[in-house]
Amino acid sequence: MKPTNDQGRKGYVLGITLVATLGGLLFGYDTAVISGAVGSLQAFFIDSLQADASKAAAVIQQFRISVSVVIMIIGLAISGQMLKLFGKKKGYLLSATLLSILLLVLGFSFLNQPLVMTERIANSLKGFTIASALVGCIIGGSLAGFVSQTIGRKNGLLIAAMLFALSAIGSAIPERMNFMGLEVINAFIVFRVIGGIGVGMASMLSPMYIAEIAPANMRGRLVSWNQFAIIFGMLVVYFVNYFIARQGDDQWLVETGWRWMFASETIPAALFFVLLLFVPETPRFLVMKGRPEEAHSILVKLSGKLRAAVVIEEIKATLQQKSAPWLSYGGLVIIIGILISVFQQFVGINVVLYYAPEIFRSMGSGTDTSLLQTIIVGAVNLTFTVVAILTVDRFGRKPLMIIGALGMAVSMFMLGMSFYFERLGVGALIFMLTYTAAFAVSWGPVAWVLLSEIFPNNIRGAMSIAVAAQWIANLVISWTFPIMNDNTWLTSMFNQGFSYWIYGLMGLLAALFIWKMVPETKGKTLEEMDALWTKNNQ
């Protein structure tokens, strides 16, 4: 149906935007579904290996190969960014050096290592299993730019929807979907990586699609919906996990319940795929591919006849703009972009989002109670994300980021003290909630605002370095939390408080970094940011 008036066109745009934000919802759903299954996955996949040495040896061997592949993928991702940053000659030299060092380290680390399930390997395997989707996120994020330029934004989202569905089915029944002949836990990891590829693609393509389909006067609000959808997807899956867990006892959850948690993602994934069939490709992609007539037809539905012709010419003009070398403004803006992304993860947010039920169990809560408390965390996260969206243009970026970092630091230090002194009552829950609120009102959405504003127009592609750094930092934090938190020596010394103190320290460093290094971008045009970095580089 073709909209014929302003109200109809607005409804048409809103409908298309809601479809695209399902990509953000699935982003949140897929990354957070693991939270309700951590304990069950450990019992089902890892604890069972203690009684079967030969099976444990096979799992460890495949695990080491997987880790090697992951590290080399990260090395290649960094190498690709080096080529863009330093140019081909210096970039190839630095890339070759980095990859050679990684190969030597991997060879030395795994040479003559016994295939025995020690505590360290068990904790590392648990962390990698939980964080494995993030490996796919790195791959998907790296591929998203190529996919968007070759087959389009809509088709890229269709592929992401299919990857979500395949991952949901494969993660739920890895024994039956194990076409690769791997140990079952490694088959599960492969399907989680596949889902992560979908997340990595959707994390770029959904906001890109919305930004390119929305009229200029609605673009800011509509793009912010994607961040809201991500948090909403997390909250939805916390409810889903809670109601699934209530269907049986802990033993049922270990054997069957976790499978339903992953399988539940097939419903929103299928809905996303079907609805995408009814939305158009973006006008910008169509013009880029030499199909201006199709682009004009879509723009008429989006903006009306008078505006459509003007927008077509604007698109053609922007496609002719040339990018500058990424170091045109010096290295400081690149470093700031990377550190914003790294600190956003190093403050420990995804430990809370992925491991919340396990943290609450360590406080003494039962399975149902811990999942219910996780829902409260999700609700606080969603509520204060909305607060951030409503206040970021009023109070500025730097004040929110500094106050948020300090709030997270205090909350994490106090949570660590609660574990250390074994005072795990209502106070510990309050510290978890204040930490989540402090992140949601600051470093969650506002970090993305800063990243979108801090890079001048003609080096905007350099933002990909910051995004890649964010996924890598996310993987590091999510993987290492069980290694620290479940370590016998650290637990005996600090009663599981050690890791929270590390994240508290990161909060203090994040506040200092924003205060000393990051300029305020509130109210500044992109041209003013260009002038700022030009002046700093002189």
Image: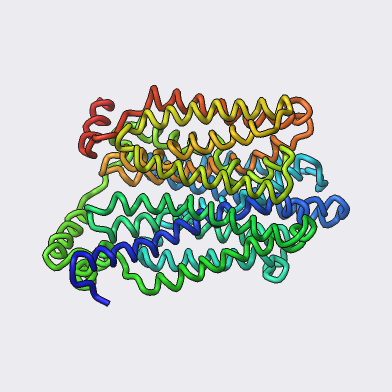
As drawn, the residue found furthest toward the left would be 306
- In this view, the residue in front, 90 or 458, is 458
- In this view, the residue in front, 534 or 431, is 431
Q: Position of residue 144 (x, y in %)?
A: 42, 57
Residue in the image at 38% along x and 62% along y: 18
Residue 3 shows in the view:
yes
Quarter of the view holding residue 204: bottom left
Is 151 placed left or right of 79 in the picture? Answer: left
Looking at the image, residue 192 lies above or below residue 67: below
State the colouring used for the structure image.
rainbow
As drawn, the residue found furthest toward the front would be 426
Residue in the image at 39% along x and 36% along y: 337
Residue in the image at 39% along x and 31% along y: 400
Image quadrant occupied by the C terminus: top left
Quarter of the view holding residue 206: bottom left
Looking at the image, residue 173 lies above or below residue 141: below
As drawn, the residue found furthest toward the bottom would be 1
Image quadrant occupied by the N terminus: bottom left
Q: Position of residue 49 (x, y in %)?
A: 82, 53
Q: Position of residue 509 (x, y in %)?
A: 50, 25
Is 155 placed left or right of 240 in the picture? Answer: left
Count up the numbered dots: 0
Residue 475 shows in the view:
no
Looking at the image, residue 432 lies above or below residue 537: below
